[in-house]
Image (spheres, rainbow, N blue to C red):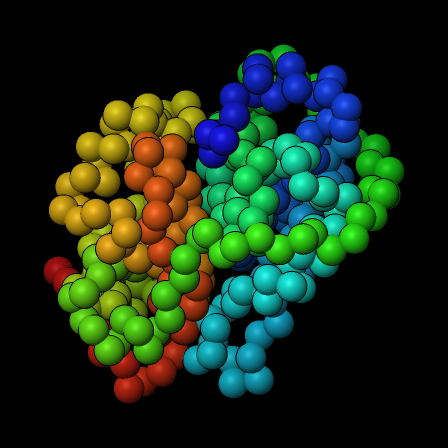
Amino acid sequence: MHPLITATALRQRLGEAPPPLLLDCSFDLMDPAAGERAHAAGHLPGALYVHLDRDLSGPKSPRGSIDGGRHPLPSREVFAERAGRWGLRPGRLVVAYDAQGGCYAARAWWMLRWIGHAEVAVLDGGIAAWQAAGGAMETIAPAAPEAAPPYPLGGASMPTVDAATLLSAPGARVVVDARAGERYRGEVEPLDAQAGHIPGARHRFFKDNLGPDGRFLPADALRQRFASLGADAARVVHQCGSGVTACHNLLAMEAAGLGGSALYPGSWSEWSADPTRPVAQSA
């Protein structure tokens, strides 16, 4: 299915049985409790809150970011069990949303696709678009979902690439960095061990996928912009700080009909934690 859903289309589908499973993924890297507070203050009717650290990441390695980065992926089996606790069964539509331009919702979208669930979309424009379309918000905590068995794993249709693979064949893949320009260039680094970027990586700030209204650009515009990378989608590897906002670029490419790219889950937080790995900076 298309990876984006409009607020109008979502309102129409809420009357289905079962209704779409709504996941509020709002988050703030600088204040990890902010998304949960915002959810309590108002969320889409029936939406469950999923936390980036607790629900959309695995435990950090005893060696810290050097193995897996700041937001390592859980195993597919562990995430399938979590999805079952949310009441997810094959065929049920899932709509993920946030109030940050879709970057955290995109992580949930990618992970659900990663365990084989195809019926998942991100609410285009997030909470702002929902309210602009006349959608209601509620403050009452949703009823506990009826837990389902662990989601039956399908094939891993969302490929990943690790640091060793990137190091072993530099230039074989087109690495795309989704971080802000000043972090990519190495001017500042507020979160990770070193400033800079993976040598040879190209820059595509994830927020450039959005228009002034906070919605994703039309498919043709996205296609043109990603075509400037000069590589087939299957050769592209997306990374960011910790494998989160990179999913926004993966989502945008999927919306543009350019599916098949890979994610480097550890991203810069993992890469930069190992002092033996090369680092580039640019003016």
Label count reads 0
Side of 106 relative to 194 (left or right):
right
Q: Is residue 193 above or below residue 171?
A: below
Q: Position of residue 21 (x, y in %)?
A: 70, 35
Q: Position of residue 215 (x, y in %)?
A: 42, 27
At x 76% / y 28%, what residue is drawn? Answer: 18
The image quadrant of residue 242 is bottom left
Q: Position of residue 56 (x, y in %)?
A: 60, 56
Foreground of the two, 173 or 280:
173
Q: Is residue 173 visible?
A: yes
Q: Position of residue 275 (x, y in %)?
A: 31, 85
At x 17% / y 49%, what residue is drawn? Answer: 231
At x 44% / y 80%, what residue is drawn? Answer: 66
At x 15% / y 41%, what residue is drawn? Answer: 228
Q: Is residue 3 above or below residue 113?
A: above
Side of 14 relative to 226 (left or right):
right
Foreground of the two, 260 or 11:
260
Image quadrant holding the C terminus, namely: bottom left
Foreground of the two, 53 or 147:
147
Q: Is residue 182 visible?
A: no
Foreground of the two, 64 or 31:
64
The image quadrant of residue 131 is top right
